[in-house]
């Protein structure tokens, strides 16, 4: 399954820490650096307060409990309670600020990715699966959230706390501290072993997750085929195999965690055993008080805590580096359709289109359009016909600058398209496609496309002019009737009518219809013909159609064949030439006559 393979390739893990990537990630943190400083400060204050609890405990044991002195002990208890309250306060501040930073950074990264995606040319989306791009905006950014919400601050805090507690241990009793440090090499060996195994386990889990995501996405999208050919049981069996692999990978990952953390606890217990043994000897020799021993036990426990945390943060760092690498690879993709430093626009837009020896290929030298030249005068109605793959839709894509042509020139009112600001160019055009995309929302959302300059009155009028108002009467909400995702509650004809209303509402100077009526039934087609005739008046228009009956009245018909312009003229002129257009027309009406869909006899065509 190619989709699954693509996901597998992108899940290959790089280094656990990449300074170059981390430097770029920190640019998103820079606006919140003082909040992070405050969070680290709160973390250190929390450690300081917790350590002070141990010193208060030592003081209470040595000066009050062991001496049987109850007088003044309530002050110790109050101080202990006050420190606990302060610890809770700074812990709250630390947790809140770290998650606040994480959410803001996550928001900023998502906005930058989505803004960048909107500026990429359509060719990029042709080569990259939508599911993968959605993963960049969602899963990969979520992974970075773990780094910024708990990783960066806690890693800094754990390192500083480790230094702090080492200093505290040496300060209390350096001889006993050296006894505790004897176990550190064992802890380092266990940590490095866990890190290596956890890395492999993490990679395996990520690959299995990628595989199950790819499988689910593919088969949910193709559910109609699965049910049509009764492949439910076979598909379920394949999913079961992939799901079992994921479960096994998780089990292996859990196994290493289940071994590592008890190992750390055992090493900690061994350290505590040494501490009790040598501490007891020192108490016996009056070189250490009982309170000091209790203090030391507390500090040792705190000493091992950041070590355990740092091992866990390794996985967060590993995942973040992999996600950031994929995110920055996307952000580093340069948009190919960009405005020039100096742009031009006509003083008055007329709508004259000129193709001058245009050559275009998606992959050179496989030319989709080869030396195409023609002119569309302002207000002219021009039709473009040709067999599938002739280059009709590619021609429209060039006019919109979804792609840039390699040779020749396309001029709009005498100015090359590449000299126009892209937004200005597209604001003069409206495109109605065969495959209409409907957004979730309501009818107004799909007509005005969130353009606040288009009022509800304009939307209502546009819907009326294309005949959609007869469907509005079926809903109490009218133009505010909810539309489901991808227009699931609308028929193909209703979607097409909505697209016509959308074009009407934006009132373009140039209207382009790309197979716009091919999916519409005869009744609906008659419904929109009068609206189309009104819409096309005084407006430059280009019509791509397979139904040749819809373009007989065009001012000019352009016939494309294998990317070249082969014929051009009016309907009657092209029929008289008995060339490609004549053959297309003859074949179409023969086919329609044999199915009974058209009353026009073939003999009339041959006159």
Image (spheres, helix red, strand yellow):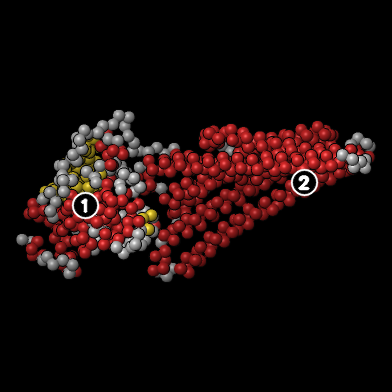
Give x and y (percent) for residue 118.
38, 43
Q: Is residue 263 above or below residue 165?
A: below
Label 2 crowd bin: few (<14), some (14–19), many (20+), radius 10 Å: some
Q: Is 484 positioned to the left or the right of 347 in the image?
A: right
**Image location (x, y in percent) of residue 81:** 77, 43
- Who's the residue at 35% across and 56% down the image? 480
Q: Nearer the viewer, residue 390 or 346?
A: 346
Residue at screen point 93% across, 36% down: 286
Q: Secondary structure at mark 1?
A: strand
Above or below residue 437? Residue 119 is above
Pointer 2 with pointer 1, Cβ within 8 A? no
Separation (CA) of disc 2 from disc 1: 76 Å
The earlier-in-sequence mark between 2 and 1 is 2
Foreground pick, 511 / 253: 511
Residue 499, percent across and down?
28, 53
Q: Indicate which disc residue 495 carries.
A: none
Q: Is residue 407 left or right of residue 271?
A: left
Write the residue at 76% across / 38% down.
Answer: 51
Label 2, on which residue? Answer: 267
Residue at 74%, 38% in the rendered image: 49
Q: Quadrant of the N terminus?
A: bottom left
The location of residue 379, given as percent across then percent down, is 15, 44
Dot in front, 2 or 1: 1
Name the residue beneath numbered marker 1: 544
- In the structure shown, which secondary structural element does the residue marked by tag 2 occupy? helix
Q: Kindly give the residue lying farthest to the left in the view shown.
A: 607
The C terminus - image quarter: bottom left
């Amino acid at each position: 399954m190619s989709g699954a393979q693509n996901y597998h390739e992108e899940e290959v893990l790089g280094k656990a820490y990449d300074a170059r990537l981390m430097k770029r990630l920190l640019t998103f943190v820079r606006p919140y650096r003082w909040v992070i400083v405050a969070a680290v400060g709160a973390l250190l204050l929390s450690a300081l307060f917790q350590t002070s609890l141990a010193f208060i405990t030592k003081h209470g044991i040595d000066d009050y409990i062991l001496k049987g002195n109850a007088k003044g002990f309530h002050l110790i208890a109050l101080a202990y309670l006050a420190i606990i309250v302060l610890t809770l306060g700074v812990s709250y501040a630390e947790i809140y600020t770290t998650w606040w930073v994480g959410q803001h950074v996550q928001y900023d990264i998502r906005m930058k990715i989505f803004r960048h995606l909107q500026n990429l040319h359509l060719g990029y989306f042709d080569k990259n699966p939508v599911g993968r791009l959605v993963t960049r905006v969602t899963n990969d950014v979520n992974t970075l959230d773990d780094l910024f919400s708990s990783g960066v601050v806690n890693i800094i805090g754990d390192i500083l706390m480790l230094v702090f507690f080492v200093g505290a241990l040496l300060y209390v009793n350096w001889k006993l501290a050296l006894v505790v440090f004897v176990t550190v090499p064992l802890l380092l060996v266990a940590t490095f072993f866990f890190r290596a195994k956890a890395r492999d386990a993490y990679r395996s889990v990520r690959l299995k997750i990628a595989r199950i995501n790819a499988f689910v996405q593919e088969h949910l999208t193709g559910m109609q085929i699965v049910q049509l050919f009764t492949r439910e049981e076979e598909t379920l069996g394949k999913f079961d195999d992939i799901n079992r692999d994921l479960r096994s990978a998780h089990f292996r990952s859990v196994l290493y965690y289940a071994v590592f953390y008890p190992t750390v606890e055992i090493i900690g217990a061994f350290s505590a055993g040494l501490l009790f043994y040598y501490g007891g000897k020192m108490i016996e020799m009056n070189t250490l008080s009982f309170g000091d021993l209790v203090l030391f036990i507390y500090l040792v426990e705190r000493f091992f805590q950041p070590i355990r945390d740092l091992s866990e943060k390794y996985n967060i760092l590993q995942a973040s580096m992999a996600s950031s690498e994929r995110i920055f690879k996307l952000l580093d993709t340069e948009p190919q359709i960009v405005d020039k430093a100096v742009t031009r626009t006509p003083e008055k837009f007329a709508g004259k289109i000129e193709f001058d020896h245009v050559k275009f290929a998606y992959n050179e030298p496989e030319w989709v359009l080869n030396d195409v030249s023609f002119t569309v005068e302002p207000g002219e109605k021009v039709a473009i016909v040709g067999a599938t793959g002739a280059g009709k839709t590619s021609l429209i894509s060039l006019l919109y600058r979804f792609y840039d042509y390699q040779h020749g020139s396309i001029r709009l009112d005498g100015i090359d398209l590449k000299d126009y600001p892209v937004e200005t160019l597209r604001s003069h055009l409206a495109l109605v496609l065969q495959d209409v995309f409907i957004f979730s929302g309501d009818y107004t959302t799909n007509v005005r496309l969130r353009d606040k300059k288009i009022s509800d009155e304009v939307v209502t009028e546009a819907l009326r002019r294309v005949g959609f108002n007869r469907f509005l009467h079926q809903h109490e909400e009218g133009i505010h009737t909810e539309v489901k995702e991808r227009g699931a509650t609308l028929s193909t004809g209703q979607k097409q009518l909505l697209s016509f209303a959308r074009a009407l509402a934006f009132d373009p100077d140039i209207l382009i219809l790309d197979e716009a009526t091919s999916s519409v039934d005869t009744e609906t087609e008659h419904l929109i013909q009068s609206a189309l005739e009104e819409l096309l008046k005084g407006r430059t228009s280009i019509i791509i159609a397979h139904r040749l009956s819809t373009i007989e009245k065009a001012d000019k018909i352009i016939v494309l064949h294998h990317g070249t312009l082969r014929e051009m003229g009016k309907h009657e002129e092209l029929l008289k030439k008995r060339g490609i257009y004549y053959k297309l027309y003859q074949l179409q009406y023969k086919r329609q006559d044999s199915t009974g869909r058209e009353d026009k006899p073939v003999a009339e065509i041959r006159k």
